[in-house]
Image: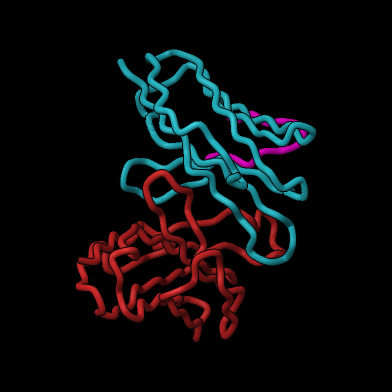
Chain colours: A red, B cyan
């Protein structure tokens, strides 16, 4: 099992550019989510999905879009990058509510994004 | 007020020392509690869940005090490899995705 994979590991964008951060998991987890981590702050939820075709907004969704066409993949799109989106982005997955230990989240290695 | 608060540290301790971290949460409806560990520039990984009766995993002991709304993590006989940031995590069993991460407490264990 590769677990949760993310690409790219590093990215530099100019203000106004768009891009997609990729996330995939091979554990057949129902739930997937995107977080951003900024210095001095906890991980903040951007968007999440409880299954293929179902997504919802988290705490800080503005400027980001997601889709979930398959169980495995959950890409995050930055529509028009801004310097405030400079952060480390983590994708995570976990089992659904009915599973034992469903609250343990498995994180990808992160994408470090800089917007200039 | 942050929903989950932790002392950011850093805690600088010698090898072999015992160190304790506390975390407070504001939502009394919180039902699931965890400690995650995050190494520098790496992803968070689950260290242990925290149960109402308290639980131990080797050198690590976690306690939950629902009345005072705090969680603690005790590390005994600290190792150099324990140096990391420890994240307190609180979840509501709402069926949604209400999981709140604390900002973390940094620990440095020195030889």
The residue sitting at 52% across, 45% down in the picture is: B46
The residue sitting at 31% across, 47% down in the picture is: B41
The x, y position of residue A115, in whole percent, is 24, 66
Quadrant into which the C terminus of chain A falls: bottom left
Q: Horizontally, is B38 left or right of B99 in the view?
A: left
Q: Of B26 and B20, which appears nearest the observer?
A: B26
The x, y position of residue A79, in whole percent, is 35, 81
Q: Horizontally, is B68 left or right of B23 in the view?
A: right
Q: Horizontally, is B45 left or right of B4 in the view?
A: left
Image quarter for residue A12? bottom left
Main SS of the magenta part reads strand
The x, y position of residue B15, in whole percent, is 38, 15
Q: Reply yes or no: does residue B35 show up in magenta.
A: no
Q: Reply yes or no: does residue B51 show up in magenta.
A: yes
Image quarter for residue B9? top left
Q: Horizontally, is B26 left or right of A61 in the view?
A: right
What segment carries the magenta color?
A: B47-57
The residue sitting at 41% across, 32% down in the picture is: B106
- Residue A1 in view, yes or no: no
A75 versus B33 height, above or below: below
Q: Of A67 and A106, which appears nearest the observer?
A: A67
Quadrant into which the N terminus of chain A falls: bottom left
């Amino acid at each position: 099992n590769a677990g949760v994979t993310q690409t790219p590991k590093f990215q530099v964008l100019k203000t106004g550019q768009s891009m997609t951060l990729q996330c995939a998991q091979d554990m057949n987890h129902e739930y997937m989510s995107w977080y951003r981590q900024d210095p001095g702050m906890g991980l903040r939820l951007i968007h999440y999905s409880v299954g293929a075709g179902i997504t919802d907004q988290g705490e800080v969704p503005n400027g980001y879009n997601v889709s979930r066409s398959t169980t495995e993949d959950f890409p995050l799109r930055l529509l028009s990058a801004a310097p405030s989106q400079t952060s480390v982005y983590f994708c995570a997955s976990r089992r659904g509510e009915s599973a034992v230990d469903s609250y343990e989240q498995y994180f990808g290695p992160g994408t470090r994004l800089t917007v200039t | 007020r942050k929903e989950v608060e932790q002392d950011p540290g850093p805690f600088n301790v010698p090898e072999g020392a015992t160190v304790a971290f506390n975390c407070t949460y504001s939502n009394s409806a919180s039902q699931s509690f965890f400690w995650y560990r995050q190494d520098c520039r790496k992803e968070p990984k689950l260290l242990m869940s925290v149960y109402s009766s308290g639980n131990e995993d080797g050198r690590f002991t976690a306690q939950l005090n629902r009345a005072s709304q705090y969680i603690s993590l005790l590390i005994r006989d600290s190792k150099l490899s324990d140096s990391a940031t420890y994240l307190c995590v609180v979840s509501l069993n709402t069926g949604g995705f209400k999981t709140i991460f604390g900002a973390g407490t940094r620990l440095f264990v020195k030889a």
